[in-house]
Image (cartoon, rainbow, N blue to C red):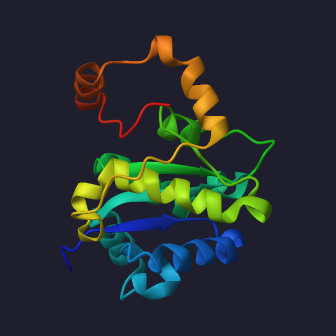
Amino acid sequence: MSSKRHIMLSYQWDNQKLVTEVYHRLSAKNIPLWMDIHGGMKGHLSESMAAGVENAAAICCFLTPKYQDSVACKNELTYAKEQDVCIIPIRLVATWKPTGWLGFTITGHKWIDFRDIDTNMDLRIQQLIAEIQMLVGNKLDCFQGMKQWNFIHDEDKKEEEHNEEHSLSISEYESKKKKTNYCHFA
């Protein structure tokens, strides 16, 4: 088992085409990735999945109702949370909100919105890269010596300004982050 860190892509098979596109775009930026169909699965299924999670700096979960219903997806994400792997939820369905085990697992995490990728794929990939760099960039060689991306979409900026009065100081954020094991607060 390699100790090299990566970003794990967790998805339900109906979204394989989209996740493969994300895989190729992130790979083009030299971000180390783990995806089942791109060399992640070696040997026994459970051992490969466990190694993928254990060596992940973060897990990007592409959320849909079928993801929520999938036993394999539930096992991956639950194990990632137990291993204190950073979770980056990616929203794919506009009219659906995770509930049950999935809603509980991702509560408090910042969403990356891929609901409009037909028109905004480049923008969403930039947001995802910025989020990865912010959360786990210090754990991945590809970000070493690189200036931190300061990517805020106009929509996000308005929401940020609206929530400014409720924002935490950096020291309060770091303290709360350590106490809760959350990667990022929404």
State the image coordinates of residue 103 (x, y, percent, origin top left). 58, 37
13 above or below 73?
A: below
Q: Is residue 41 visible?
A: no
162 above or below 65?
A: above
Q: Which residue occupies 54% across, 42% down?
A: 152
State the image coordinates of residue 38 (x, y, percent, origin top left). 48, 86
State the image coordinates of residue 56 (x, y, percent, origin top left). 32, 63
Q: Which residue occupies 57% across, 62% down?
A: 125
Q: Is residue 130 left or right of residue 133?
A: right
| Towards the viewer: 173 or 4 | 173
| Towards the viewer: 70 or 135 | 135
State the image coordinates of residue 48 (x, y, percent, origin top left). 36, 77
Q: Which residue occupies 28% across, 62% down?
A: 146
Q: Which residue occupies 27% across, 67% down?
A: 55
134 above or below 118?
A: above
- Position of the N terminus, as image quadrant, is bottom left
Q: Is residue 76 left or right of residue 114?
A: left
Q: Is residue 139 visible?
A: yes
Q: Is residue 151 left or right of residue 44?
A: right
| Towards the viewer: 88 or 78 | 88
Q: Quadrant of residue 101?
A: top right
